Image: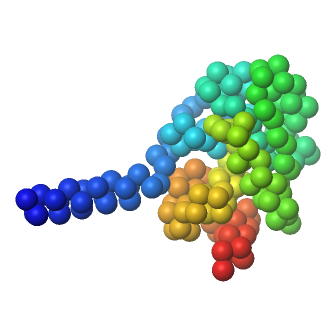
Amino acid sequence: MKRLLAILMLFGAQLAMTGAQGQVVREDVEGIRNFAQIESVVACAGAIVPDSVAQIADMGFRSIINLQRATEETANVEGETAAAEAAGIRYVHLPFGGPDFDPAVADRFLEAIVEPDTAPAFIHCGGGGRAATMWFIKRVMVDEWDVDTALAEATDLGMNPDGGSGQFGLNYVAERTR
């Protein structure tokens, strides 16, 4: 009986550790670059076209958080805003990009992502890396995940820990979790 209990406890612990990191699912979705979804909680992606906003709402997302700067070639902030309004989906524009990444944008992202009408959230930028970085920051700062587990998930989503926004994200959480 003790052995069975020990095996069940070991199995449960293993299940808990595996379940700690969300399962990243990638799909090809017309009008959305680099779509990657974690269960039904969040999707991180690259650039979208305004016509895809209705499809994003149909997928069950309640908000779109756009991290593209309006000056980016693939950005269409006005078009996305109008499409989100027409689809009845919350739209938040938080321009975030280099060469100087602004910690205040990450702070505003954290405020936006925890608002009750945000989840499930569709987060996007130009290629998906900045969106994955913001999700990494949220996992550590809000969900209190350890950095390694959050980094593994964010890397699956498209964060480059050696790149500009990825390095920013690592520095951001390191400075705030000391």
Residue at the far left in the pictured view:
1
Residue 142 vertical position relative to residue 171 in the rendered view, above or below: above
* Quadrant assignment, res 123: top right
Q: Residue at x 73, y 44 (%)?
A: 115
Which residue is more in the foreground, 127 or 60? 60
Residue at the far bottom in the pictured view:
178
- Place of residue 35 in the rendered image (x, y in percent of width and height, measured from the top left): 61, 38
Is residue 171 visible in the rendered image? The answer is no
- Place of residue 25 in the rendered image (x, y in percent of width and height, measured from the top left): 50, 40
Which residue is more in the foreground, 147 or 27? 147
Q: Is residue 19 left or right of residue 87?
A: left
Q: Is residue 84 left or right of residue 37?
A: right
Residue 77 vertical position relative to residue 22 in the rendered view, above or below: above
- Place of residue 88 in the rendered image (x, y in percent of width and height, measured from the top left): 78, 23
* Quadrant assignment, res 108: bottom right
- Place of residue 162 in the rendered image (x, y in percent of width and height, measured from the top left): 64, 69
